[in-house]
Image (cartoon, helix red, strand yellow):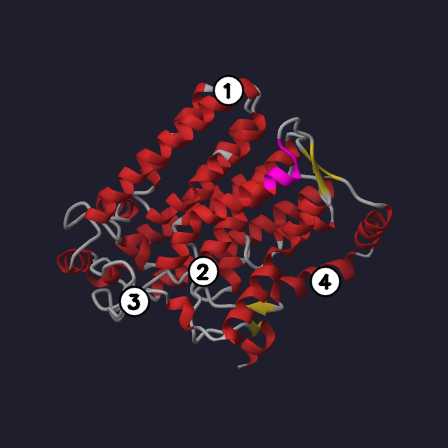
């Protein structure tokens, strides 16, 4: 167990170093997307996605440092806190070859490194929030009334990025397993109330979705540290566009229907490939719940995905949206494994395979590295993007 924890801590430490290197590179190069997304602020008044950018802007003014350095400090702290929370959760999970492949899926923790253009995005704040929620739920002294504080804090997260709305049901997924049967009706009422409040927030944000004046003022407020082509390209520029408009302000309604069969086939292969460890996790696991079993768990995952479908219609960042699903499903499953509601149940053949891989670590590490880096796909889905072999991509 000591060696396993040592490997785990080393892995997360390396992830942290790569995170700092990447976000520093984004800041130095004034990247329009990975840097610019964080700097949308309220200098022209209230606007969607502006909360974190306003905090970074005021942090810069308070400590008399430039926006670039403020960005690096804030994002370094968020990255460290996120990875630390991941470590706290993962150190208690049952270690086997399936859980390791889950961790090394190309759409999970390594997503920001493998996929060009992703970087550290605002969903990291949602992950921190969700991890804190799950870790607190493990605490037997955690009073039930505090569940509500987490739940009804959720609409405020939409001020950071409205896409979080499409992942709201994940808050109730762990609660379905730990809430007594007599309290289930109350839990359902809370879900509908929270959904209603979140929809109101979405309508508010849509009303303040942005104008050309917002774009200009935000770019001017950042001065020489504004993202490249701030008023012509990127998230700040996109504030002035209506839904279903791309960066050139062209209509992108049903954009995914324009892709050919090759693009569709390649993307489906990539997603199935990336999610395959989770399929194994569910296949070789059992749920020890008197109410919910594996069948019900899969059913709820399908409902959650259906809830998120509008997001896939209005935005091309499909790999990003799938990655959020993968993160939240994995966090939920690990939580259920820790509290003994989910347990692995290996057959003799699978158990022999597991023992073989752990005894032959060189072979196992090689398999994991190949799996993680074999296939790559851009963060968005469109008619011009196709599945690639990572090694061939690097050579090109």
Q: Would you name the residue on which mark 2 appears?
A: 318
Cα distance between the residues tagged 1 and 2 = 36 Å
Q: Position of residue 15 (x, y in %)?
A: 54, 53
Residue 199 shown left or right of residue 19 in the figure? left
Pick whichever, 169 or 75, lies toward us: 169
Q: Would you name the residue on which mark 4 appears?
A: 367
Contact between labelled residues 4 and 1, with CB atoms less than 8 Å apart: no
Is 192 colored magenta in this rendering?
A: no
Quarter of the view holding residue 101: bottom right
- In the image, which is nearer the foreground, mark 1 or mark 2? 1
- In the image, which is nearer the foreground, mark 3 or mark 1? 1
Q: Give the range drawn in magenta.
A: 292-297
Residue 275 shown left or right of residue 364 in the figure? left
Residue 153 in sight in this render: no
Pick whichever, 135 or 387, lies toward us: 387
Q: Would you name the residue on which mark 3 appears?
A: 246
Query: Going 53% across and 48% down the picture, which residue do you hit?
Result: 327
Cα distance between the residues tagged 1 and 4 = 46 Å
Cα distance between the residues tagged 2 and 3 = 15 Å
Please rate how many residues cluster around mark 3, counting C-alpha atoms within 10 Å: few if below 14, some from 14 to 19, many from 20. Answer: some
Contact between labelled residues 2 and 1, with CB atoms less than 8 Å apart: no
- In the image, which is nearer the foreground, mark 4 or mark 2? 2
Pick whichever, 139 or 15, lies toward us: 139
Query: Going 44% across and 73% down the picture, which residue do you hit?
Result: 259
**Helix, strand or loop at disc 3?**
loop
């Amino acid at each position: 167990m000591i060696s396993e924890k040592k490997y785990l801590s080393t892995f997360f430490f390396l992830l942290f170093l790569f995170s700092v290197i990447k976000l520093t590179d984004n800041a130095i190069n004034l990247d329009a997307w990975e840097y610019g997304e964080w700097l949308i602020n309220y200098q022209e008044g209230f606007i969607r996605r502006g909360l974190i950018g306003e905090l970074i802007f005021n942090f810069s003014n308070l400590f008399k440092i430039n926006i670039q350095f403020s960005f690096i400090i804030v994002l370094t702290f968020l990255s460290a806190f996120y990875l630390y929370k991941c470590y706290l959760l993962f150190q208690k999970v049952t270690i086997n070859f399936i859980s390791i492949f889950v961790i090394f899926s190309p759409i999970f923790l390594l997503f920001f490194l493998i996929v060009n253009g992703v970087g550290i995005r605002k969903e990291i704040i949602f992950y921190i929030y969700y991890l804190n929620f799950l870790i607190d739920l493990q605490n037997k002294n955690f009073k039930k009334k505090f569940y509500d504080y987490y739940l009804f804090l959720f609409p405020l997260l939409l001020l950071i990025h409205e896409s979080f709305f499409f992942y709201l049901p994940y808050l109730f997924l762990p609660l379905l397993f730990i809430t007594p049967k007599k309290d289930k009706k109350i839990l359902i009422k809370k879900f509908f109330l929270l959904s209603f409040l979140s929809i109101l927030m979405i309508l508010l944000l849509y009303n303040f979705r942005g104008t050309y004046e917002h774009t200009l003022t935000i770019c001017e407020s950042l001065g020489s540290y504004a993202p490249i082509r701030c008023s012509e390209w990127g998230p700040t520029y996109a504030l002035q566009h209506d839904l279903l408009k791309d960066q050139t302000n062209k209509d992108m309604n049903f954009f995914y229907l324009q892709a050919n069969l090759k693009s569709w086939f390649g993307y489906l292969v990539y997603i199935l490939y990336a999610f395959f460890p989770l399929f194994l996790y569910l296949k070789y696991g059992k749920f020890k719940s008197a109410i919910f079993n594996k069948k019900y768990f899969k059913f709820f995952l399908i409902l959650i995905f259906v809830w998120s479908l509008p997001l896939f219609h209005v935005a091309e960042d499909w790999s990003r949206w799938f990655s959020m699903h993968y993160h939240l499903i994995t966090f939920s499953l690990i939580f259920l494994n820790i509290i003994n509601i989910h347990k692995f149940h290996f057959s003799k053949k699978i158990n022999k395979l597991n023992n073989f891989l752990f005894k032959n670590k060189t072979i196992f590490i090689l398999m994991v590295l190949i799996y993680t880096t074999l296939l790559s796909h851009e963060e968005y889905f469109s008619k011009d993007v196709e599945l690639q072999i990572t090694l061939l991509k690097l050579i090109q």
